[in-house]
Image (cartoon, grey):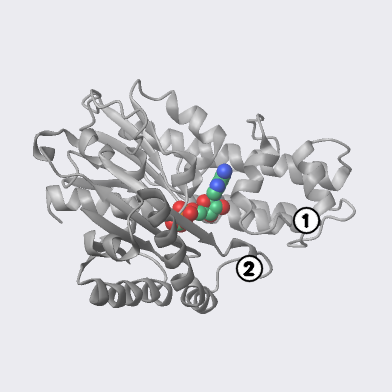
Amino acid sequence: MYFFAIETSCDETSIALMEYKGGKIEEKNFLEKINSVKVISSIISSQAELFAKYGGVIPEISARNHAEQIYELFELVVREGVAKTGLKREDIFKKVEKIYVTKTPGLMSALRVGIEFAKSIAYHLKAEVVPVNHLYGHIASSFYHPVNSFTNKSVFPHLHLLVSGGNTQIILMKNWKDWQVVAQTLDDAAGECFDKTGRMLGIPYPAGPKMGKIAGEEFKNIVNLPIGMNRSDQKDLSYSGLKTAVRYLVQGCKIEGVVYEKVLNDVELKKLYEGKNLNDKLKFIKDNTISIQTVIIEQLIRQFKKQLKGEVKSIGLSGGVSANEMLKKHFEKLHKSSFLTERYLSGDNAIMIGLVGVLNDFYGD
Ligand code: KG4
């Protein structure tokens, strides 16, 4: 079966043409099932640059941008599909049975564009539109390693850390359909905290990946930021204390050139990435960045460990922040069997939506 997958929940427009070969799939285990899905062609168009000048995503602008480019992206995916399969366009369309599309959670107006587009192509292709949950998508992406799928690994019970720009959750999964959120953030998501504290320091949106690059291999709470939810009976996560502490540090800083939310220029950013020739201002930004990353990771790891009981057979990490190298390094050490999301799937993408669509077909929605 061929199918399209569509993702427009936030500031990425993404479409994929995928295939799953039926056969004796019912006999396959979970990892074999998900890894028998094939990506024929896919595309992601990010609006991150557009929102850099605003310091964050503006839903209406994001929705308009999705609407402006979604058809063109669809065309590109179809054309690549033709080139990759050797099939004619009409023959690809005939083989498409389903259109999986992100329904929730996300920005209402942005989601709407993807859903309406899915409905209109479904009408022409005589295919079925199937709504998919975006968070399931992130989780599914951690299990997708078609080149080396480790299909003999035991997966469930599985403890998962989902860290994105909109969500931070620790999820215990008995199987693909039976799961519960055992801990979550009480305020912002981890990615949102990177972006907001980064913005205070002048690091352009999205600050998360840039902060990871600036911090590099250093892991230390240099400026002594608070790590919330410290008591042993506190299982959730919180970023409000950290954000307030960074705000006071930047606003109270007397170093020349340190101005709250004043955006750094390209030369300053380059110096920060290289870690060389840092003046007092850049040194201040670097020390804060290293400390913020350290504190965020320490809290994630500490709270995750609280849920890590003996019966857990594997752990997983997904969502935009799962691209953070330092987080991956610390996370991997927690269990002998860990599923890390490949970098190309860590941010929002349509492939993960297609994976969930297929899994839901097997296991029920
Ligand atoms: O999963 P995602 O693309 O969007 C949501 O579904 O929310 O996550 C985007 C978030 C942004 O906040 C971004 O700053 C953060 O992931 N992020 C990172 C890194 N790469 C992306 N945060 C820290 N380190 C990174 N390397």
Q: Secondary structure at mark 1?
A: loop
Local packing at callout 1 (Cα closer than 10 Å; few below 14, some 14-19, many 20+) is: few
Q: Residue at 22% across / 59% down in the picture?
A: 95
Mark seen at residue 212: none
Would residue 262 appear left or right of 234 to someone viewing this image?
A: right
What's the distance in space between the residues labelled 2 and 1, CA to CA? Answer: 31 Å
Mark seen at residue 252: 1
| Picture quarter with the C terminus | bottom left
Would residue 85 appear left or right of 264 to someone viewing this image?
A: left
Front residue of 148/199: it is 148
Q: Secondary structure at mark 2?
A: helix
Would residue 344 appear left or right of 313 to someone viewing this image?
A: right
Please state which of the two labelled residues, at mark 2 or mark 1, is closer to the viewer: 2
Front residue of 120/354: it is 120
- The kind of residue on which mark 1 rests is Gly
Tell me where residue 360 appears, x and y as whole percent.
18, 52
> Looking at mark 1, is its residue's CB closer than 8 Å to ligand 1?
no
Q: Earlier in the sequence, mark 2 or mark 1?
A: 2
> Looking at mark 2, is its residue's CB closer than 8 Å to ligand 1?
no
Count of all numbered marks drawn on residues in the image: 2
Front residue of 144/259: it is 144
User: Does residue 224 show up?
Assistant: no
- The kind of residue on which mark 2 rests is Leu
Q: Say which residue label 2 marks.
A: 50
Residue lying farthest top?
A: 336
Q: In the rendered image of this protein, does residue 102 appear above or below residue 228?
A: below
Mark 2 and mark 1 in contact? Answer it, CB < 8 Å. no
